[in-house]
Image: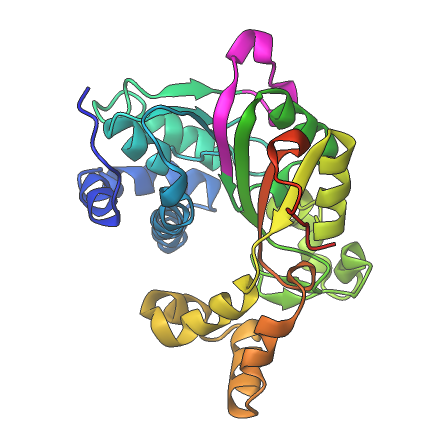
Amino acid sequence: MNKVAASIEGLERFSAGLPWAELEGVAMPYLNTDRAAAVAFLKTLQLEARFGLNLIISQLSHDKRILEVGAGIGLLAGYLNSCGYQITALEPGLGGFGVSAALSTAVSTRPEFSSLHRLDLPAEKLDADLQGGFDFIYSINVLEHIPDLENAVRGMGAVLENRGEMVHTCPNYFVPYEPHFGIPLVPLAPRFTVNFLPKLKDSELWQSLNFITAARLNRACRAQGLMMNLEPGVMLRTFTRFDTDSEFRRRQGSSFVFKIFLFLKFTGLLYLLGKLPASWGTPMVAKISRRESNSRSAKTSF
């Protein structure tokens, strides 16, 4: 297999070659047979793959063993595999995401995905004796859906090489906002939001949420001898996407968070978000490594 450097342009070409119309039909039974919902879901997968590649591209190397946790359809992992990277795609299809497993199966026989190494087990079942070690582990908007977060961190830590690194991006529910539904949450008690929006009780997506916070993830890491650093300025960059990313603005233009953006922008308060501690912002980008592999000067955001 040829080894080429990953790029956004390459990902777009790879994605354009997939049978998206056929995949809509695969997704529809999981989305109330709503074709528009299937189209929107698949578009979101493509945007998340692009976002994910931008997030991890500086960490990629053909010499590293890479694990994507919660790979979904395997779009990003499949592309990286086609570039010659040593990547494994983990996707158990749990927590209301059976659609991801179905789509993954649908594309698995295509030449672009046939050689992709896949694991269909939850992260807490990872075992270095069975799967070996990984130099780089990442996830894109996945940790908030893992039922047993602490044991998932333990499992990922168990297969992380001594000088390896993890990068995970997900919501930080310390901020009382739910991005999947675009709704505010009851502060400090997000599960009580169903008392005000009872329809949420019937949503598999809502039921899958563990309401992860930066503090909880940090505790889980520390328990496994891992060090977590939060990337600063993530919330500010997310808000400014309303000005720079037309597709993001189209999808979120009527949301609660867009109204917050308008208020902050026109009051001149927007850039104060960049002054907040990273642990107070959402989403968060957590970089995790073993304590002994960090320099003495490394600091967490806590």
- Residue 213 visible in the shown view: no
Question: Is residue 267 located in the magenta-colored stretch of the structure?
Answer: no
Rendered image coloring scheme: rainbow
**The C terminus lies in which quarter of the figure?**
bottom right
- Horizontally, residue 135 falls left or right of residue 172, namely left
Question: Which residue: 58% across, 58% down?
Answer: 283
Q: Which of the image's four quarters has the N terminus?
A: top left
Magenta span: 121-138
Residue 13 showing in the rendered view? yes
Q: Quadrant of residue 125?
A: top right
Residue 199 horizontal/vertical position (percent): 68, 58
Is 170 on the left or on the right of 64, as rendered? right
The residue shown at (24%, 37%) is 5
Number of marks in the rendered image: 0
> Seen from this angle, which residue lies furthest bottom?
267
Q: Residue at x 48, y 30 (%)?
A: 136
**In front of the other: 102 or 271:** 271
- Residue 50 point in image, percent of width and height: 34, 49
Q: Nearer the viewer, residue 94 or 170?
A: 170
| Horizontal relation, residue 124 to residue 140: left or right | right
Residue that lies at the very extreme toward the front in this rendered image: 296
Q: Position of residue 296 (x, y in %)?
A: 66, 41
Relative to residue 137, is residue 13 depicted above or below? Answer: below
